Image (cartoon, rainbow, N blue to C red):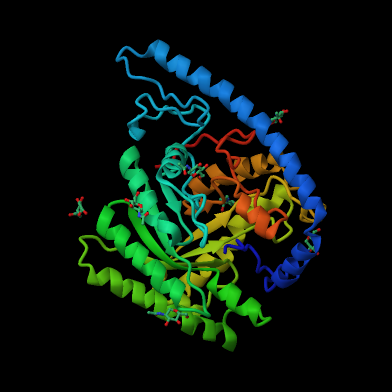
């Protein structure tokens, strides 16, 4: 799954020298008894946070009912991070003044969307959409397994929020089954919920990065890179054909997502849009340079790369952000700056409104912490959220610069 990689700065001119394979080996080596201690610590922290959440929830619902003249019942679930004035109507959620609609987009995977366990559900996705719609009008998914496309579109319908979604198919080079399965999930979601809230379908997540890394290479336009492209492009073309065959009343663009320095030229020529991961953290950039580095990298590598092909695909930053902690000491900093909440705050303060001003399309990475990634990959992988995994906001001040 998304080793959100981030990786892949090793072939950069400014000498990132980052090696994804080495990183993985290091991750494996550091896994062990330390993790148990960390998990115990997290449980204690979680209990404290839940305590705070209950206090805040009660305050909000009291506040609401004192103002309410309609007699609508406040949500009975007072320790929920989102309150509804009508518990049966998800569109009646109470806005959180700490959340500002300042993000172009957010990266999102509903909790419990990995096979074989799955375990996601509509009430949790509704809550996520209620929170995210207070920050942005665009989200991107990474895959379609476990019914996540339909759940997200259903949650948007039930909350009645203004939200466009980039659905996604997480295909792999070695097996056609995941592609076929997820294509079917997306077709079902379009048939059931229509196209009004679908902005695109992204085929591939770090497909070329993974293909090259497996071959011990890093040049997306090498012969091996073109072999990878020859496996990815038929899936992109097939998705476009599937959409065309549905005779929809709207054109849905089809794109791909990859690490910023892993866009193959033939893939570029086959997409309507590209989403590029641009991660100052994994390029060992210091926090004070991070926002400017991200803007420069995206411009020089991805915007320039798109402009060099005839179809000039629309480019977005698929992921950028800053982790707030590491589960092992070895990844507590990137050599230049620490994984920390204050550093995420600096990145928010120096990137978000500036990128909006510059007209950059980006998906901030990410909505909430993902414990499954911490279990699977360790290090900083599980700790990139604006929200904690329990949907409480981290100790952050969201920048205030409205973007539609
Ligand atoms: C829904 O999923 C959330 C996790 O996102 C979980 O905490 C909750 O227990 C689930 N609810 C049901 C009813 O399964
Ligand atoms: C998928 O989600 C949709 C929307 O909530 C729901 O109507 C449908 O029953 C779900 N399908 C499965 C197989 O769970
Ligand atoms: C396309 O169809 C949807 C129903 O799926 C409808 O809501 C929408 O208004 C239609 N759009 C146009 C441009 O006709
Ligand atoms: C999708 O890609 C996989 C892996 O590259 C390939 O095996 C399969 O044939 C492709 N399917 C289609 C319909 O393009
Ligand atoms: C990036 O920082 C990590 C952690 O300090 C270090 O192990 C790695 O060698 C650094 N990589 C480069 C290219 O500086
Ligand atoms: C915005 O544009 C300015 C001027 O080109 C640039 O210096 C800055 O790095 C950009 N910042 C972001 C976050 O896009
Ligand atoms: C929250 O962050 C602020 C700085 O922005 C700091 O002064 C404060 O101590 C932090 N609070 C907690 C509970 O960590």
Task: Name the side, left or right, on which 293 lies relative to 334.
Answer: left
Percent across and percent down for residue 129 are 43, 42
Residue at x-position 58% and y-position 88%: 223
Q: How many marks?
A: 0
- Asked if 93 appears above or below 279 in the picture, the reply is above
Task: Name the side, left or right, on which 363 lies relative to 281.
Answer: left
Quadrant position of the C terminus in the picture = top left
Residue at x-position 36% and y-position 63%: 185
Q: Is residue 73 visible?
A: yes
Residue at x-position 66% and y-position 59%: 376
Percent across and percent down for residue 225 are 57, 82
342 or 298, which lies in front? 342
- Toward which corner of the image does residue 281 lie, by quadrant? bottom right
Percent across and percent down for residue 284 are 74, 58
Q: Is residue 253 visible?
A: no
Percent across and percent down for residue 172 are 51, 74
- Asked if 386 appears above or below 189 in the picture, the reply is above
- Asked if 227 appears above or below 307 in the picture, the reply is below
Quadrant position of the N terminus in the picture = bottom right
Task: Name the side, left or right, on which 129 lies relative to 389.
Answer: left
């Amino acid at each position: 799954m998304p080793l959100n990689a981030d990786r892949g700065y090793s072939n950069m001119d400014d000498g990132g020298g980052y090696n994804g394979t080495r990183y993985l080996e290091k991750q494996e080596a550091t896994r062990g008894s330390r993790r148990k201690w960390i998990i115990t610590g997290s449980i204690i922290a979680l209990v404290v946070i839940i305590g705070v959440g209950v206090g805040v929830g009660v305050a909000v619902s009291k506040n609401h009912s004192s103002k309410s003249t309609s007699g609508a019942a406040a949500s009975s679930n007072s320790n929920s991070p989102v309150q509804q004035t009508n518990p049966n109507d998800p569109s009646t959620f109470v806005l959180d003044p700490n959340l500002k609609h300042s993000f172009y987009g957010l990266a999102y995977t509903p909790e419990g969307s990995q096979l074989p366990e799955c375990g996601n559900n509509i009430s949790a996705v509704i809550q996520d959409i209620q929170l995210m719609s207070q920050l942005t009008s665009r989200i991107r998914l990474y895959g379609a397994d476990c019914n996540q496309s339909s759940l997200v579109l259903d949650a948007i319908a039930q909350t009645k929020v203004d939200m466009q979604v980039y659905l996604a198919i997480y295909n792999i080079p070695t097996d056609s089954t995941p592609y076929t399965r997820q294509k079917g999930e997306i077709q079902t979601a379009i048939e059931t919920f229509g196209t009004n809230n679908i902005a695109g379908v992204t085929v591939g997540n770090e497909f070329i990065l993974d293909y090259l890394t497996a071959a011990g290479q890093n040049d997306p336009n090498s012969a091996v890179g073109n072999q990878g492209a020859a496996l990815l492009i038929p899936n992109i073309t097939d998705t476009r054909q599937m959409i065309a065959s549905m005779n929809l009343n709207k054109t849905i663009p089809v794109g791909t997502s990859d690490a910023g320095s892993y866009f193959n030229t033939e893939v570029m020529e086959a997409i309507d849009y590209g989403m590029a991961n641009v991660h100052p953290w994994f390029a060992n950039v210091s926090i004070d340079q991070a926002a400017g580095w991200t803007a420069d990298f995206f411009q020089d590598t991805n915007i320039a790369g798109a402009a060099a092909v005839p179809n000039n695909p629309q480019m977005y930053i698929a992921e950028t952000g800053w982790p707030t902690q590491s589960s092992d000491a070895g990844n507590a900093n990137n050599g230049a700056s620490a994984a920390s909440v204050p550093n995420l705050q600096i990145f928010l303060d120096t990137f978000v409104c500036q990128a909006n001003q510059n007209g950059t399309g980006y998906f901030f990475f990410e909505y909430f912490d993902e414990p499954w990634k911490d279990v699977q990959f360790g290090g900083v992988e599980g700790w990139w959220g604006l929200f904690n995994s329990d949907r409480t906001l981290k100790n952050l001040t969201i920048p205030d610069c409205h973007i539609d």
